[in-house]
Amino acid sequence: MHFLCTFEQLQNTPIQTFDLMVENEQFPVILLLSEDKIRAYHNQCPHAWVPLNRADSNILSGCQQYLQCSSHFAQFNMLDGYCVYGPCQGRSLRRLGAQLVDSNIFIYL
Ligand code: FES
C-alpha cells in the first residue's frame, strides 16, 4: 500500500500524477476524483508503454473530458480508463486499487 496524498489535496486538484519508486523502478500513477469517486491508473499507455504526460505536459484532452497521451493523442475515459480514440483504441489503462483511510489516499499496485 502506497500513500499518495490527502483527500483534501485531491479535492483541490482532482487530477494528479505521481512517480512512485517501487523496487528501485519508477511507477507512474494517475489519481483522479470524478463523480465523487477516487480512481487510480498506472500512468502507462497500453500502446507504447510510456506515461501519458511525458515532459510534464497536460494530461487532459482539449475538451477536458478524457485523459490524453501527449505524444500520440490517444484518449481514455476517466471513469474506466478505456481508450476511445487513438492507436490503442479498445484497450485500457491498468486500474489500480485506491483506498481512503482517515482522509489519506493509498493505492495498491
Ligand atoms: S503512447 Fe500510446 S498513444 Fe501515445
Image: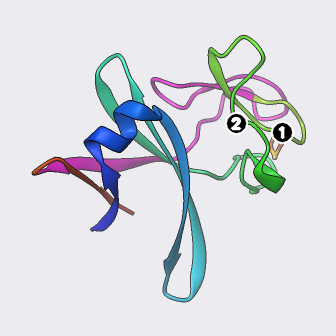
Residue 27 relative to residue 83: left or right: left
Q: Nearer the viewer, residue 23 or 60?
A: 60
Secondary structure, mark 2, is loop
What range of the chain is rendered magenta?
75-101
Q: Answer yes or no: disc 1 within 8 Å of ligand 1.
A: yes
Residue farthest to the top? 63
Which quadrant is home to the N terminus? bottom left
Q: Which residue is mark 2?
A: 59
Q: Is residue 50 above or below residue 74?
A: below
Q: Residues within 10 Å of mark 2 (few under 14, many from 20)?
A: many
The image position of residue 65, as x and y in percent, is: 62, 14
Ligand 1 position by quadrant:
top right
The image position of residue 41, as x and y in percent, is: 49, 46
The image position of residue 75, as x and y in percent, is: 72, 25
Q: Amino acid at mark 2?
A: Ile
The image position of residue 64, as x and y in percent, is: 66, 16
Q: Are marks 1 and 2 in contact (CB under 8 Å)?
A: yes
Q: Which residue is mark 1?
A: 70
* Residue 69, image quadrant: top right
Which quadrant is home to the C terminus? bottom left
* Residue 38, image quadrant: top left
Q: Residue at x 59, y 36 (%)?
A: 92
